[in-house]
Image: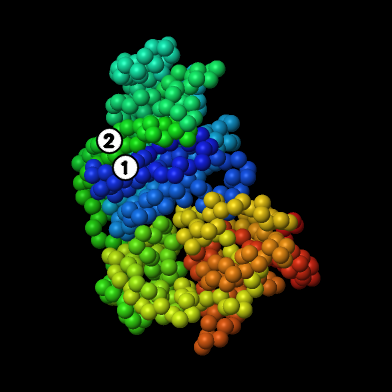
Amino acid sequence: ITVVTWNVGTAMPPNDVTSLLHLNTGETNDADMIAIGLQEVNSKINKRLKDALFTDQWSELFMDVLSPFHFILVSTVRMQGVILLVFAKYYHLPFLQDIQTDCTRTGLGGYWGNKGGVSVRLSIFGHMVCFLNCHLPAHLEKAEQRKEDFATILHMQQFEGRVANGILDHDLVFWFGDLNFRIESLDIRFVKYAIDSNILSQLWEKDQLNIAKSTWPVLSGFQEGPLNFPPTFKFDVGTNKYDSSAKKRKPAWTDRILWKIKSPSIGHGVGGRQPSRGVLSVSQLCYCSHMEYTVSDHKPVAAIFAVQFASKTDKPPVEIYVADEWSRPEQAVVRYKMAAGFHRSSWDWIGLYRVGFRHPKDYVSYVWARSDDGERCLEKQLYVQVMFSEESLPKGKGEYILGYYSNTSSSIVGMTEPFQISLPRSEEGSSPTDSSGSSSEEEDDSTLVLLAPKSRSPSPGKMKRHRSRSPSLAKFQGLILRPSSRDRGMSRSPSPQSRRGFTRDIPTIHLPQEELGRCGAKAKEPERAANSQEGSSFYQTVQEQGHPRRVSADNPLARADPRNMGLLPALRLEMVNQAMGQRRESTDQSYSCQRMSP
């Protein structure tokens, strides 16, 4: 497990972070997971608006760099400028379960999220592990405040489930971030002399965190490797020189990575399994800073751990079987078997992914997991068979992977090895990717869904052109943004509630007529096309015997793309005159839900 922490100081991402993640090095070719904690990501109003619509630039960068190495984004959580990303190799995904996130604000007495902690907890091969990224109060004299804030974070963060409800209840905790501990007593000239002379050990005993580990009960059991790298704060931006401003801040090891193993006497098994019984061991293979990155006044810090579990779960919740190659459409048959005790849902689906996909929603195509006889197959441990339609299959040659996405756990619970698809390219050059029904060419060009990365899984990879590196929203002249209310209760994953939720409004961006030509072509693509709303009913275009027709959401045929079924917040683009017409109609028809004025 590789853990990285970096206070980026509101800077733009660098071009390459390969060395920071210790990729392409012999010692870490076998890395299984990577956790990245960022602090002070730019969270000004204009940036937060763009990041609410599109994936933030830092997350995009790490997904771009890690996906060629077969790392998939498992979970992410953001609280203003504090972000935590957890990646894992794709073949580990079925064994990463019970994924939950939490965040705690401690800035301005708990009302502001510039300081605090964000966490991702999950079961790894049946063992509970928690990653906690914190940004604690600054300044030398605030050591006691840092202790109180950390205690508050540990107390406030609670998770659902039968085991590991609190952070310290997990078998293993990684605590990292800009913890802001400073060097006491010593003069700045002596600190710089010790750094230049490489006698860092003379600074260790005056480090506030080292002192606190032996005096604060809240830090009991936390371990850290030796600080054999220079203090990581504060540097002049763009250089490797310590602060030369008028303030001349004393160098300090503010950026730290610690871990804690739970005492075996209070161990709990997961899902009826035996606890670790003290056999869980953690070895730190590397603990270093990276001086080559100069975009911030902090240097990033990385640590590599070898974690040895006493046992592991080696059977996934869902086993998927597929042929080695699909060279004809009729070969696109998928057979799967669910393990006893698996909690299936009618909203489960099987995604077809290209090798090198970025996150669970980054699929090429999908098919709904068969549900008419699912309970019988689950009870009798029988195989279930589904088939991808010819229209939904990618054309050409390539390597692909199938993954079973569980709506209940919001994660992939079954995965195949890579296999080949070799299908002739269509003469028209088009290849629909939605096997559950596509939007027709006749559908209104003025409607386009933008999916935002607010859920635990980010926006679809096909929205790449809309991410935050693209031109800002300022290019849309005459923009009217209709805010959404907090009490809508939209589900983050497909569920029966989300079917009913479509009758409500979604936030809308109105564009003048001339602007719509830029996005009309995109609106015709099935994965990005929004379903138009007429009156108080939601409709979706489906294909029936080669002819498109529109059906109500109450009809079973109206199952939409999983990426659009409440998985992520959505925005609808439409013409101003069309929107005003709908607003006038809503007055006559007396909508049950409140209409938002511009």
Report x, y in % for residue 390: 41, 80
| 253 in relation to 91, above or below | above
| 74 in relation to 103, above or below | below
Q: Secondary structure at mark 2?
A: strand
Per the rendering, the mark at residue 286 is 2
| Residue at 37%, 20% in the rendered image | 207
Q: Can residue 277 be seen?
A: no
Q: Nearer the viewer, residue 524 or 14?
A: 14
Q: Determine the image quadrant of residue 231.
A: top left
For the N terminus, the quadrant is top left
Q: Determine the image quadrant of residue 151.
A: top left
Report x, y in % for residue 42: 55, 40
| Residue at 55%, 67% in the rendered image | 528
Q: Which residue is mark 1?
A: 22
Q: Is residue 573 left or right of residue 145?
A: right
Three-letter code, disc 2:
Cys
Q: Are marks 1 and 2 in contact (CB under 8 Å)?
A: yes
